[in-house]
Amino acid sequence: MESLRVASTGILTNRLPFKLSFKSLKYVILLASYSFLGYKLLTFHQYGDLASQWNQMPLSQFWWLAGVIFLLPLNWYLESLKWKMLTARVQSITIAASVKAVLSGISTGFFTPNRVGELVGRIAFLDHQNRKAGITLNFVNSMTQNIVMALCGIPACILFFIQPTQVMQPDMVHYIWMIISGILILGFVYLLLPGISQYIGKSNLSSTLKEFTDCLSGYTLIELLRTIGISLIRYVVFCIQFYLIIRFFRIELTPLQALIAIPTTYLFVTFTPSLAFSEAAIRSSYAVLVIGTFSGQVVNIALAGVCIWAINFILPMVVGSVIMIQKSGEQVSVLK
């Protein structure tokens, strides 16, 4: 009995530095995220245009904005439901815990390239022994959304580039073929993930690698397709949000033009390397480039791109940072 107690104490002591370093990393990331957010707010030069548009807006227009905000919880609920499904074979978590993990991930991914730092916030809500699997599952989660973005965005992108002249430029043909080839490979690999995991498990490869991949071996084709399905529904939701914010700023765009412009804009944003805090500028520039083909309201289009980014990322980031701080406080009390 005494030896068991000593062994348990030794394990806790060995894990203590990791817990403290992981906690420190979360605080550093949160500090960096808020620093970048502050920088972005200070360097935003369109406050005058935004105030002017706001003051001129009829009260009836705010129903469109209300629709955007109303869909925000649904957007992140779907993402949380997907994360809960992905982690189910590793660790059963409640939908409430999944929501907290997703929102925390938004805050920790805010200043990292293409939001790869999301995994820090998400795996914080998994048990220590499941966090390596959580890293892999976060990658799979991003893969599913990128597949949907490409599958929906490529046809719209083709229509966008052929509609003015009926001929697509050679450079764009090459670009589209590169994305199509990449998404076909990505989709093929995604469906083969369970088989790849089983092969690695039976091979003589490093046991460390197996700790990251074993979590994928139990998924069925139905489960993989269901995850893609949730990604597709979520994609439809934030496309509707974008359309509503376009209507809010009274941008002249027909539904057919929106069906071409919005998926094309999201396709460019998704496959452009960026930091989450810089996505406001990227979204605005792509929105002006794409939607501006159909409408000359450049200022309104740019503001729509900024506002949809602020609603979908700034608000969840603030909530997520509060959740992360609370989570860190709980871990400190456990260590005591």
Image (spheres, rainbow, N blue to C red):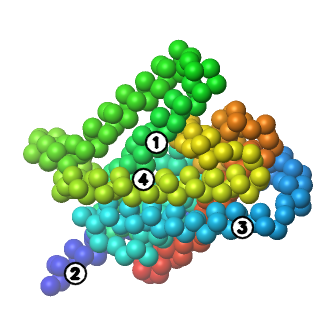
Q: Residue at x 61, y 57 (%)?
A: 241
Instruction: Point out which mark residue 152 bears.
Output: 1
Residues at marks 1 and 3, CA–CA distance in whole angstroms: 28 Å
Secondary-structure class at tag 1: helix
Which residue is the extreme one toward the bottom?
A: 1
**Which numbered disc, 2 or 1, marks the residue that appears first in the sequence?**
2
Residue 105 location in percent, x, y? 50, 60
Q: The disc labelled 2 sits on which kind of residue?
A: Arg
Residue 321 location in percent, x, y? 59, 67
Q: The disc labelled 4 sits on which kind of residue?
A: Leu
**Which numbered disc, 3 or 4, marks the residue that appears first in the sequence?**
3
Instruction: Point out which mark residue 232 bears.
Output: 4
Secondary-structure class at tag 4: helix
Residues at marks 2 and 1, CA–CA distance in whole angstroms: 57 Å
Marks 2 and 4: in contact by CB < 8 Å? no
Out of 55 and 139, give the one closest to the viewer.
Answer: 55
Residue picked out by circle 3:
63
Instruction: Point out which mark residue 5 bears.
Output: 2
Give the position of the C terminus as an image quadrant: bottom left
| Residue 102 sits above or below residue 145 on the image | below
Q: The disc labelled 3 sits on which kind of residue?
A: Trp
Marks 1 and 2: in contact by CB < 8 Å? no
| Residue 180 sits above or below residue 1 on the image | above
Residues at marks 3 and 2, CA–CA distance in whole angstroms: 62 Å
Task: Tell me if mark 2 has few (under 14), some (14-19) or many (20+) residues whose alpha carbon lies within 10 angstroms of its own.
Answer: few
